[in-house]
Amino acid sequence: MHVEHLLRLDSLDLTLVWGDESLLGQEIGGVTATDLEDPTRFLQPGEIVLSGLVWWNPADGPARTERFVSALREAGAAALLAGEETHGEVPRELAEACRRHRIALLAVPAHTSFRAITEAVYLRQWGELSRRPSDLYALPENVRGELERELERGVSVGDLLESAFAHLGTPPCHLLTGSGRTIARTATAAELPARRASESLRGARGAQGTTLRVEADDTAFDAWYLHLADEGQVPPRVLHEIAEVLGRHRRRHDRRRASRRQAGQELAALLDIPHADTNAVENALSSCGLPGRGGYTVVVASATPAAAEEEEGADAGSAAAALAEALSHLPGISFAVGARPGGEALAVIAHDGIAHDGIAHDGIAHDGIAHDAATHGTTAQDTTAQGGVEGVDRTVRAALGETWPLVHACRPASALYAGVSEPVAGPAGLGAAVGQARYALAAAARTAAPHTAHVTAAEDLTSLEALLAGVPDDVREVYRTTVLGPLLRAGRSSNALLLETLEVFLAHNCSWARTAETLHLHVNTVHYRVQRVETLTGRDLSRLDHRLDLRAALLCR
């Protein structure tokens, strides 16, 4: 395992502060955690050093920092992983010292425990050992043979998980997605709420247990993790071999589901066609396993990488995986997801796909794994008993509102937005629903802070500002320049004063006195400036419709 591999582990959320390619390519020989000012005698060459920086104080000057980093260099440390919890950030002088001594420096966020890093290193090392050519296996031969036969028979992942751990006394174990949704669990494992599971996967403070990612062709949003609540119950090599078996199960299942994913793509593409033929839409819904009639809700999502991830691209596959994962937290919902160009994904949710027992009529979870409602680690309340379009619509909004932050935590440096349509009564209304969802998505992306998660439903657009947020940028710009006209001309300081006066005047319900008080002007000056605005824009601020025109133009800036 090399230093750069730690940066690729989504569950650790580490940040590179300094280090070139040659330093990041160093092999990790072990892990030492220390807060000694001079840890030389405790270090071995090739180790990464974990430090909470308790030894550092900004008032001590650079000498102590120099002594610590030079000790790492003399010992041949592979990298320094500095915790941010004590000081809120990695001190600049520490970064400069690491650069001088050529020690790779990684920042460890407060929500990542040193134990999680240590386990990641040693589990990876054991896994690499177990994958070397050898006639020796950690799993007993009879267990490996039984698991191979079960794979061939196509048993459920729950049965496979139970068989894999049976010879160990069936310790409590969960198979989780990155957002904390339970795919399967052993009979001895208690139900694990998604939020708590997500925290455990990320090594939050107080979290315990061992976690290992199941290697498969996946994304950060739909990856699988083996999680054992108790440490040390399963030897690392055994755990890696079980994870490899589960990875083979997933890859086989994903291949079998290829046609279903293609059907979702075709449905999404069809709904992008204006006035698509209703019969064609009904056939596409049927191909996705959805009813050809009844109520539907559309959700459109986008997943955009952070600046540090831009080389990977903002692919629609990530958005589709994120959206499918979020909706899968809600038991009893039948849906189809398709990726669209431009980093967008579209989901159609069928209201008739809900059964009163909380299980989808098709009996298949949309990650392709059959399981009952008890295996869901969902955070959404089970409101399926409400029935009808209104009940399902509330359920969809509640599920996305609760699970969207958990899904976003799988790739926290990215931006993850979603727009939800109003429910429609049949296939003929799906085109309009797509338009609503896209408009709500644009509003979510415009109003949310960068690199956050946000969901906006069409019914949330209850103000002029929220409504305008979904208008395309080029349309907003044309409207703004058309209405405000000469007030936007650059190079004239008086225009800026007029715009400020107009904004304050409208914000105070066109009160001359309150505008003058806020701007510290004489009321006659306010009258003069407002008259100039009316002259330049051709609007009469005594008329409500003209006031709304100007207010909308200001909001389009």
Image: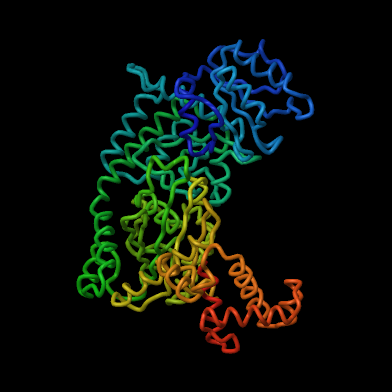
Is 28 placed left or right of 68 in the picture?
left
Please identify the quadrant where the N terminus is shown: top left
Q: Is residue 190 visible?
A: yes
Q: Name the residue at the front extreme.
A: 492
Which residue is at the far bottom? 543
**Label tally:** 0
Residue 467: give x, y in percent of width and height. 49, 73
Q: Residue at x 39, y 70 (%)?
A: 297
Residue 142 falls in image quadrant: top left
Residue 456: percent from left, percent from top: 49, 66
Q: Considering depth in this image, is 511 or 64 the residue closer to the camera?
A: 511
Image location (x, y in percent) of residue 25: 45, 21
Residue displayed at 55% across by 62% down: 491
Which of the 4 image quadrants contains residue 210?
top right
Is 335 positioned to the left or the right of 233 in the image?
left
Q: As rendered, which of 506 and 141 lies closer to the eye? A: 506
Return the residue found at the far right: 59
Residue 233 lies, in percent from the top left, at 54, 30
Which residue occupies 37% across, 42% down?
A: 218
Look at the image and name its color scheme. rainbow
Q: In the picture shown, does residue 520 fall above or below 234?
A: below
On the image, which quarter does residue 439 sit in? bottom left
Residue 460 visible in this rendered orientation of the protein = no
Q: Relative to residue 423, is residue 292 drawn left or right?
A: left
Above/below status of 282 relative to 151: below
Front-most of 61 and 433?
Answer: 61
